[in-house]
Amino acid sequence: MKKTISLICLVVCTFIWGTTFIAQDTGMDNIGPFTFNSVRFFVGFLTVTPFVLLLERKKINEQIKAKPKSFSKLIIIIGVFLFFGTVFQQVSLLYTDVANSAFFTIFYVPMVPIIVYFLFSKKLHWSIWPSVLACIIGGYLLSDISNANIRFGDGLVLIGALFWALHIIYIGKIIEHFDLPFFIALLQNLIVATLSFLLAIIFEEIDISKIKLETFEILYAGILSGGAAFAFTNFWSEKYFTSSSSNCYVT
Amino acid sequence: MSLEGVFAAIAAWLILSQILGLNNIIGCTLILGGVLLSQVAPIYEKNYK
């Protein structure tokens, strides 16, 4: 029963993430990618805040007290990886199509065990090789190598996927030591919003009236994807799956 | 949760009319198959062997 509930929850998250690509694409009709990303993750930050206050406020101190240095190190790593993952993906949508961005993003799934092999010398499963081969041939068929824009956009997505893979790996690590899924989601959203805001100041003109034109897209991506889905996946995967299989379903 | 690509592609087709050619669809299927294999095979072996 619990497994059924968590599976339904994860399918809903997948639906949210999939359709968020549309919001990310149309959300840039009037504003630049960094502004969109910054506001989106700030909305995500606000969305998670009540959950932190209601569910985790009391245990934050006691959880972190034991290893404050390890917590701050991990949360910065996670925030920065998520920032690079989302920024590369967001910018890619200026150049390539939604389906390309979505399908090249899931390259992070086979990237995870390969990175884990290099970082922590954990043995690779044989299935990784046919998987990589299928991804390369599939990627060649999906992309349009002759179109410079598409080629560039798809390249950006692949770089982003590398950071998504790193993000997933370190989310696994932090959740293992600190039982604070909402607080972790809160801080990573804040880090992504802040870093994107810096890029927006440098490279884009921030115009509130134009940001307002993208309200629906920002709320969809920020509340549903940035807020709920991240927190839910952390929360459910941790509660109802063993640590080894949770990694699978999170991806 | 690698099915997010499928949701995205269908939604892009319905909402943005970004249509995939046959080659692209074969490409997506290969990627999805590869990704699912790398996710499911290790768990399957662990549970049933």
Image (cartoon, coloured by chain):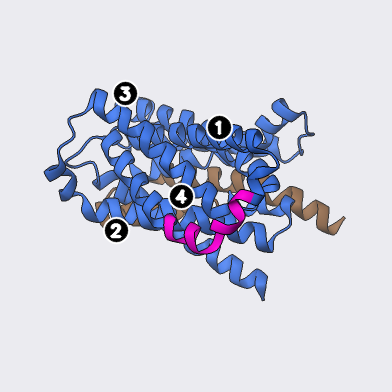
Identified at 34% across, 30% down, the residue is A150
What's the distance in space between the residues labelled 4 and 3, CA to CA? 23 Å
What's the distance in space between the residues labelled 2 and 3, CA to CA? 26 Å
Q: Is residue A56 left or right of residue A200?
A: right
Identified at 35% across, 37% down, the residue is A90
Residue holding disc 3: A148
Q: Crowdedness of circle 3 by 10 Å Cα count: few (<14), some, many (20+)? A: few
> Horizontal and vertical percent for residue A9?
53, 66
User: Is there one chain holding both mark 4 and mark 3?
Assistant: no
The residue mark sitting in front, 4 or 1, is 1
Residue holding disc 4: B5
Q: Quadrant of residue A29?
A: top left
Residue holding disc 1: A77
> Horizontal and vertical percent for residue A210?
14, 43
Residue A140 seen anywhere in this rendered image of the structure: no
Instruction: Give the SS element for disc 1.
Output: helix
Identified at 61% across, 49% down, the residue is A61
Q: Amino acid at mark 1?
A: Ile
Determine contact: label 4, label 1, CB under 8 Å.
no
Give the chain letter at badge 2: B
Q: Is residue A130 left or right of residue A189?
A: right
Residue holding disc 2: B14
Q: Crowdedness of circle 4 by 10 Å Cα count: few (<14), some, many (20+)? A: many
